[in-house]
């Protein structure tokens, strides 16, 4: 059992939790993920690590309440335990040698982009962060990004926070202003990553994306997380989760993400109804 | 009174129509009377050919003699000297190609039903065992076992009986490896695996689940922690895909994924949160035991039509005959001499059909089996909404990639010498991680042999 040490709602649909998991914390690096199971009947879901502290033995996760499992997880409070918590899995994001990087985060993807921005900053790289949300109520980690970025651009779809527009608009402006990035790291919804990659391809800037598909074991066993990258089948869990964004077949990944959409809708309604009925 | 019947006592089974709709065990096990009657068929040969056919060398005639006399616990103790997983092996061992293939009675009729007797004895033991366990005297040495499948469990059991302090590390949340994620409930109830693991725990073996060696902990760290030897039984868990067009479509599964969702994650139960596709028609590609398990799980999930697609003929099916027969009785369609060409999808990227072509058998290939050759212009569409690829697995490269000094074959199998030792000192390996996908009992044999070698090395 893995104890929840802290719980904090970041906005109405996004929650941050700090978990006591010393072994995972010791090995965790930006870009890696964990798999958790809330309870005995729970499904295994992957979540990318949002922060970690090897000395304290803690791992931070930030999740959006999108389905039955994240809903169940959000029902737990500090002091409660998560049944299973395994990791760190996947490969860390490669940051060596990067001098100037644009880190793009979209929505809850900012939770994953943040440790990367932080690690780059600690490595002495120049970090330009662009974070985007639908509206001001959904903004997360603004101060955290600010603390590790040489430049921070906040975007929102409706203009209620920062500038109005998409993260691609802001990135385009930065590039046009003459910023020369060694790499762009984009983490967020598949559609966002797809369009960031389309943009950077025009400028020939290497772009790394973090994929978070459906998976079970996270160690290469099920093949459920397979993607097509550069025409080849890759497993996000063992070959990734970071990939060269210009080679990823995003349209395929978007369709694969819908595999259990109907099941999830039912399960979510059921979980919500149970909750309304007083558990 | 010797039993001269040329045939085995039949195994009582659930009715095929009923069992195709439930996940309860198919074979029900011998009654005491059937077991004693079957035991009487054993001639108690002096040279014990059957024992030579057993990868862990169980003294088979000795345990059968105990059954004749009604001493079932005594029979269990005979098996336990050589095998730590009798209830498992009595169910999933391919006895027909091992012990039973050597049985003298098999020369003129059917061999003694050794597997069924082993199962009877193990089930008797588990139903009647007392809480008292003889915990072996500690010898003060610590060994780490990576993976809790058949190889790891058998290695841990053998080491613990020799007094070692053993810790088994498991990546998943439940111990048992392929016995819990792969082999379905109706062939091997998970309660039996859990009981065997409890037996090991009672004897002092420690289990650490949710621990991925190569990620959470490294092999080097195990040595730093004071383990004197490491046994790697990490299996062959990486699924092979067919490498045909359309494998990315929704509704294409590896058998590993499909079986893991059903077995480990219990997706067949309404109280499980794990999703699985509820298919109308399923094509399973392959011909081994895993393919049979996938077809039979698909049936039990309520699939109307389940088709096994195999490129050779029925005679070449690598699956156990018993599994093939069970699958047929339950209603699986066998489409032999048929190879998949492409998975076809609809506008939403869901599977709508498997494009196949008919094959004929040509000259024998390297494996000695006749090579399937496509028949021109024989392509046809098999209408299915789910395709499950059960065409084999490869060893997981995680430990090799994170541990210096462990050499592997080109295809990924860990290289060991005849003692199960890898190219790195004090690191041993066995089971599918070394051989590629094989059987439970071979992995158990390898685990047990490695335990002996580790003991010899640590306490020469």
Image (cartoon, coloured by chain):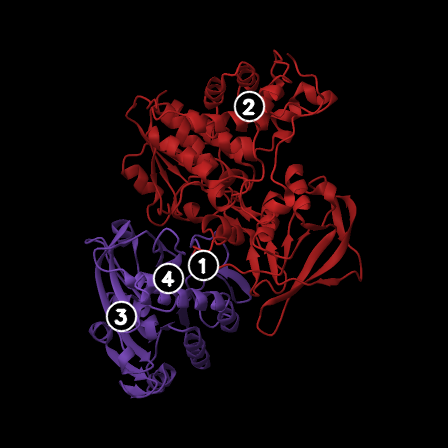
Chain colours: A purple, B red
Q: Where's residue B313, x and y in %?
A: 74, 46
Q: Nearer the viewer, mark 1 or mark 4?
A: 4
Q: In this rendering, which labeled residue sits more in front, label 3 or label 1?
A: 1
The mark lying in front, picked from 3 and 2, is 2
Spatial CA distance of label 3 from label 1 is 33 Å
**Residue bearing the label numbered 1:** A215
Q: Which mark is residue B170?
A: none
Q: Which mark is residue B32?
A: 2
Labels 2 and 4 touching (C-beta < 8 A): no
The residue tagged 4 is A69
Instruction: Determine whether the residue tagged by mark 3 lies in a helix, strand or loop.
Output: loop
**Image quadrant where residue B321 sits:** top right
Q: Is residue B188 visible to the viewer in this orientation of the structure?
A: yes
Q: Residues within 10 Å of mark 3 (few under 14, many from 20)?
A: many
Label 4: chain?
A: A
Residue B302, position as x, y percentages in the image: 59, 55
Q: Could you tell me if the residues under marks 3 and 1 are in contact, i.e. CB atoms within 8 Å? A: no
- First in sequence, mark 4 or 3: give its number: 4
Query: Where is residue A66 drawn, in percent x and y?
Result: 37, 69
């Amino acid at each position: 059992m893995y104890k929840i040490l802290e719980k904090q709602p970041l906005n109405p649909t996004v929650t941050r939790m700090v978990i006591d998991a010393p072994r995972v914390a010791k090995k965790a690096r930006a870009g890696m993920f964990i798999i958790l199971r809330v309870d005995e009947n729970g499904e295994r879901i992957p979540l990318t690590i949002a922060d970690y502290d090897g000395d304290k033995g803690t791992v931070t996760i930030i999740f959006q309440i999108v389905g039955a499992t994240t809903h169940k997880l959000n029902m737990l409070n500090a002091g409660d335990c998560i049944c299973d918590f395994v990791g760190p899995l996947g490969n860390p994001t490669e940051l060596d040698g990067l001098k100037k990087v644009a880190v793009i985060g979209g929505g809850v993807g900012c939770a994953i982009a943040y440790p990367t921005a932080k690690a780059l900053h600690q490595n002495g790289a120049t970090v330009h962060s662009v974070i985007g949300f639908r509206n001001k109520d959904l903004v997360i980690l603004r101060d955290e990004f600010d603390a590790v970025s040489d430049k921070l651009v906040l975007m929102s779809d409706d203009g209620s926070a920062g500038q109005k527009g998409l993260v691609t608009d802001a990135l385009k402006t930065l590039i046009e202003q003459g910023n020369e990035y060694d790499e762009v790291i984009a983490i967020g919804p598949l559609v966002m990553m797809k369009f960031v990659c389309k943009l950077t391809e025009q400028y020939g800037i290497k772009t790394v994306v973090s994929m978070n598909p459906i998976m079970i074991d996270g160690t290469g066993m099920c093949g459920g997380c397979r993607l097509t990258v550069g025409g080849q089948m890759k497993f996000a869990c063992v070959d990734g989760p970071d990939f060269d964004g210009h080679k990823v077949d995003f349209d395929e990944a978007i369709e694969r993400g819908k595999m259990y959409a109907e099941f999830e809708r039912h399960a979510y309604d059921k979980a919500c109804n149970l909750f309304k009925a007083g558990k | 009174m010797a039993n001269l019947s040329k045939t085995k006592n039949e195994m009582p089974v659930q009715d095929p129509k009923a069992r195709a709709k439930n996940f309860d065990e198919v074979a029900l096990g011998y009654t005491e009377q059937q077991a004693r009657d079957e035991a009487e068929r054993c001639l108690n040969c002096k040279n014990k050919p059957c024992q030579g056919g057993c990868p862990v060398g169980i003294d088979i005639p000795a345990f059968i003699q105990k059954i004749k006399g009604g001493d079932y616990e005594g029979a269990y103790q005979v098996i336990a000297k050589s095998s730590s997983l009798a209830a498992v092996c009595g169910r999933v061992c391919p006895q027909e190609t091992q012990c039973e293939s050597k049985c003298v009675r098999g020369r003129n009729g059917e061999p003694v039903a050794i597997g069924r007797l082993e199962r009877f004895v193990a089930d008797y033991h588990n139903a009647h065992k007392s809480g008292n366990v003889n915990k072996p005297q500690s010898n003060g040495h610590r060994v780490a076992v990576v993976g809790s499948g058949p190889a790891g469990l058998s290695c841990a059991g053998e080491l613990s009986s020799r007094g070692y302090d053993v810790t088994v590390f498991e990546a998943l949340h439940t111990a048992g490896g392929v016995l819990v994620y792969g082999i379905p409930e109706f062939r091997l109830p998970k309660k039996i695996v859990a009981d065997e693991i409890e037996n090991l725990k009672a004897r002092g073996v420690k289990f650490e689940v949710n621990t991925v060696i190569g990620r959470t902990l490294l092999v080097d760290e195990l040595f730093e922690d004071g383990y004197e030897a490491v046994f790697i039984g990490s299996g062959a868990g990486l699924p092979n895909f067919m490498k045909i067009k359309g494998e990315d479509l929704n509704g294409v599964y590896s058998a590993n994924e499909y079986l893991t969702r059903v077995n480990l994650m219990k997706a067949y139960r309404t109280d499980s949160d794990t999703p699985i596709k509820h298919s109308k028609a399923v094509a399973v590609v392959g011909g081994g035991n895993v393919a049979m398990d996938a077809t039979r799980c698909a049936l039990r999930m309520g699939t109307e039509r389940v088709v096994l697609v195999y490129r050779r003929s029925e005679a070449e099916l690598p699956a156990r005959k018993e599994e093939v027969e069970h699958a047929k009785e339950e209603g699986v369609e066998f489409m032999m001499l048929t190879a998949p060409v492409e998975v076809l999808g609809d506008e939403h990227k869901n599977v709508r059909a498997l494009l196949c072509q008919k094959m004929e058998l040509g000259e024998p290939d390297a494996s000695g089996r006749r090579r399937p050759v496509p028949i021109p212009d024989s392509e046809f569409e098999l209408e299915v909404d789910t395709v499950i690829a059960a065409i084999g697995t490869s060893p997981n490269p995680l430990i090799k990639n994170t541990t210096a000094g462990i050499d592997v074959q080109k295809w990924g199998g860990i290289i060991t010498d005849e003692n199960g030792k890898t190219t790195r000192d004090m690191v041993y390996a066995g089971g599918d991680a070394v051989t590629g996908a094989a059987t439970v009992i071979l992995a158990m044999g390898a685990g047990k042999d490695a335990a002996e070698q580790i003991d010899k090395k640590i306490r020469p």
